[in-house]
Image: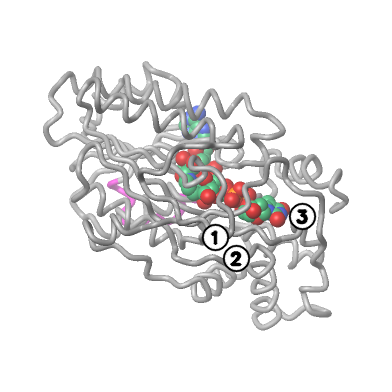
Amino acid sequence: MKNILITGGAGFIGSNFVRHLLRLAPDLNLVTLDALTYAGSLENLRGLPDEARHTFVQGDICDAALVERILREHQVDTIVHFAAESHVDRSILGPAPFVQTNIVGTFTLLEAARQAWDGKFEGKRFHHVSTDEVFGSLGPGDPAFEETTPYEPRSPYSASKASSDHLVRAYFHTYGLPVTLTNCSNNYGPYQFPEKLIPLMILNALAGKPLPVYGDGKQVRDWLYVEDHCEAIRLVLERGRAGETYNVGGGNQPHNIDVVTELCVLLDELRPGPGPYAGLIIHVPDRPGHDRRYAMNIGRIQSELGWSPRHDLKRGLRATVRWYLENEAWVRAVSAQNDYQAWMDKNYTKRGAK
Ligand code: NAD
Ligand code: DAU
């Protein structure tokens, strides 16, 4: 690995990964390709360590000519593909961009890599960042997802990610393109756009707004601190086997309502309000087709690569709440940008949470 293309590097996980590599891999040059959709922001890439090793290109992963030019000009040997439309609720209200970016965009990158590397695959790697949502929804007693669990996506978002995973594996089997995949659970931590559960609840609470819990709040997610995810991807790049998939998860199983309540308790301690923040919690109409439970079996990455999550949920949530409290300028800039307020109105007014 010398020259790495990071797609979606101005988004939440991508920007954490750019920081992670600049800190821990001193010999690498990075190029970020990001369209700067509503979810991407140059604010996420401010104050990078060792900035001279990072180049930012604004552009669309569906633009084949641009992608091919970047691969050649920067002599890219490794692609880490994060760019995606990533929010399930948005995929329900408007699925078209999910098909375009997540499926057509992934195809465009695969094809560009195949052309640019032209059969000389030694030392090359295409890493695809995917999700546990491709496996569908678990019942309370079901065993955790394994890498071999059949796909059963249930939202336009997860269906588009599942399609992209299939394309990535097809390029391995058909053309020998050296791919790896990680399917991971819900990330949280610094720089997450405040449409997702944890930052949304923190910011709504601080603004004295309702905390809209979908349905009964008894859905279960497996929360992964973003820095742990970055470490897992780096290890897969360094030592993962081509053609292989690795599940990545945080090893916890709280109900959504417990996560929201814990955030309220942390805020009561770190930024006390006029009353307990939990008083702002309301239950609102559920997400259509809402997956009930996810859980990840992470045995493969633990035994093959020695990776385990370092942050337990309690410690990770505290670090996350602190980060949002200490980064008011970022919060202001990101929530003022593009269509954030329009999205909040669109998704929450009809639920009675505006
Ligand atoms: P995000 O929405 O925060 O960031 C996505 C980034 O991709 C943004 O910077 C956006 O500008 C960019 N982008 C979108 N469309 C693009 C296009 N056509 N061309 C170029 N750039 C484009 O997403 P995230 O939460 O950081 O997720 C990153 C990846 O990880 C995604 O592939 C997602 O499916 C996957 N994933 C996320 C989670 C999670 O909990 N956040 C969990 C599992 C997997
Ligand atoms: O599991 C991995 C996936 O995690 C990723 O592939 C997705 O990109 C990422 O967005 C995330 O999907 P979720 O739908 O699980 O995340 P979200 O933060 O939107 O919701 C987490 C849970 O909280 C889910 O059960 C829905 C619920 N929720 C969410 C919001 C935004 C609420 O109850 N209220 C809300 O306002």
Q: Amino acid at mark 2?
A: Tyr
Left or right of 289 on screen, residue 14: left
Q: Residue at x 43, y 47 (%)?
A: 14
Query: What mark, if any, has residue 311 been given in the picture?
Result: none
- Mark 1 to mark 3 CA distance (whole Å): 20 Å
Look at the image and tell me whether residue 42 can be seen.
no
Left or right of 7 on screen, residue 122: left
Q: Which residue is mark 2?
A: 324
Do labels 1 and 2 touch, CB within 8 Å?
Answer: no
* Quarter residue 6 falls in: top left
**Between marks 1 and 3 in the image, the one whose residue lies nearer the viewer:** 1
Q: Residues within 10 Å of mark 2 (few under 14, many from 20)?
A: some
Query: What mark, if any, has residue 215 been given in the picture?
Result: 3
Q: Residue at x 82, y 68 (%)?
A: 280
Q: Amino acid at mark 1?
A: Gly
Q: Label 2, secondary structure: give it.
A: helix
**Between marks 1 and 2 in the image, the one whose residue lies nearer the viewer:** 1
Above or below, 4 against 311 in this view is: above
Quarter of the picture holding the N terminus = top left
Indicate which disc, 1 or 3, sits on the residue closer to the N terminus: 1
Boundaries of the magenta span:
44-53
Q: Residue at x 41, y 46 (%)?
A: 183
Q: Residues within 10 Å of mark 1 (few under 14, many from 20)?
A: few
**Between marks 3 and 2 in the image, the one whose residue lies nearer the viewer:** 3
**Cβ of mark 3 under 8 A from ligand 2:** yes
Q: Which residue is mark 1?
A: 141
